[in-house]
Image (cartoon, grey):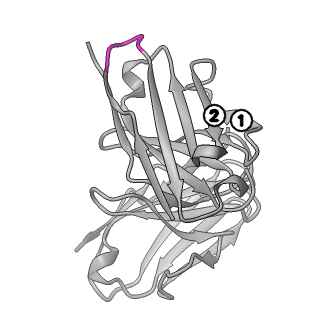
Amino acid sequence: EIVMTQSPATLSVSPGERATLSCRASQSVSSKLAWYQQKPGQTPRLLIYGASTRATGVPARFSGSGSGTEFTLTISSLQSEDFAVYYCQQYNNWPLTFGQGTKVEIK
Amino acid sequence: VQLLESGGGLVQPGGSLRLSCTASGFTFSTFAMSWVRQAPGEGLEWVSSIGAAGYPTFYADSVKGRFTMSRDSSKNSIYLQMNGLRAEDAAKYYCARVYAHLTDCFDFWGQGTLVTVSS
């Protein structure tokens, strides 16, 4: 099983600042990496797939990068609606696995 | 795209439950589908996936041999038969559409149905 490790567990950021979230895979997943956003009480929302492709309707301030085992989600200028938990997921191998999540909170 | 789960509830340890998810707004028969669960206050855990044609099926080790996923394209629905339920199976279960290939990310999610396992 590929273990996905996200860091940090919690990120405190002021509105308008840049946020950088990391996701590491225990073995290569090529570019088969997705990022999801989940707000309290809501369903997860696909943000990024293929490590760097924004899903439909996702604002340009969200960007993904990386390949192999190291991935990054960057939110260039945090808006109030971006405070949430973010999960990465690999889909290169069965079983499909998620990271434990990074909570982005207001500083 | 809409995905509507049902069938959750309270069940005793060792009991059974059958979850359903009815899809609308897309050509159901051309998409693989999955179940993903989330225990209260915890992260996301993939449970199972099924191909567009009803096969193959894949399961997480934690549910293999106890859960069975199926689909009925005539009803635009997928199902999760859960037997031998354990306390650690308690979670909100989400139905999710697989983006393109069977091994892929999830582009649409339902609102989830809550499963509670307790005596």
The residue depicted at 63 percent of the width and 34 percent of the height is B70
- Residue B45 showing in the rendered view: no
Residue topped by disc 1: B57
**Residue A90 horizontal/vertical position (percent):** 64, 54
Question: Secondary structure under badge 2?
Answer: strand
- Between marks 2 and 1 in the image, the one whose residue lies nearer the viewer: 2
**Residue A81 horizontal/vertical position (percent):** 30, 77
Q: Which residues are magenta?
A: B11-15
Disc 1: CA contacts within 10 A as few (<14), some (14-19) or many (>=20): some
Main SS class of the magenta portion in the image: loop
**Residue A31 horizontal/vertical position (percent):** 73, 65
The residue depicted at 77 percent of the width and 61 percent of the height is A30
Disc 2: CA contacts within 10 A as few (<14), some (14-19) or many (>=20): some
Indicate whether residue A95 is drawn in magenta: no
At label 2, the amino acid type is Ser
At label 1, the amino acid type is Thr
Seen in the picture, residue B117 relative to A28 is either above or below; the reply is above
- Residue A93 showing in the rendered view: yes
Chain of the residue where label 1 is placed in the rendered structure = B
Question: Secondary structure under badge 1?
Answer: strand
Labels 2 and 1 in the same subunit: yes
Seen in the picture, residue B85 relative to A17 is either above or below; the reply is above
The residue depicted at 44 percent of the width and 86 percent of the height is A76
Chain of the residue where label 2 is placed in the rendered structure = B
Residue topped by disc 2: B70
Whole-number angstrom distance, CA of label 2 to CA of label 1: 8 Å
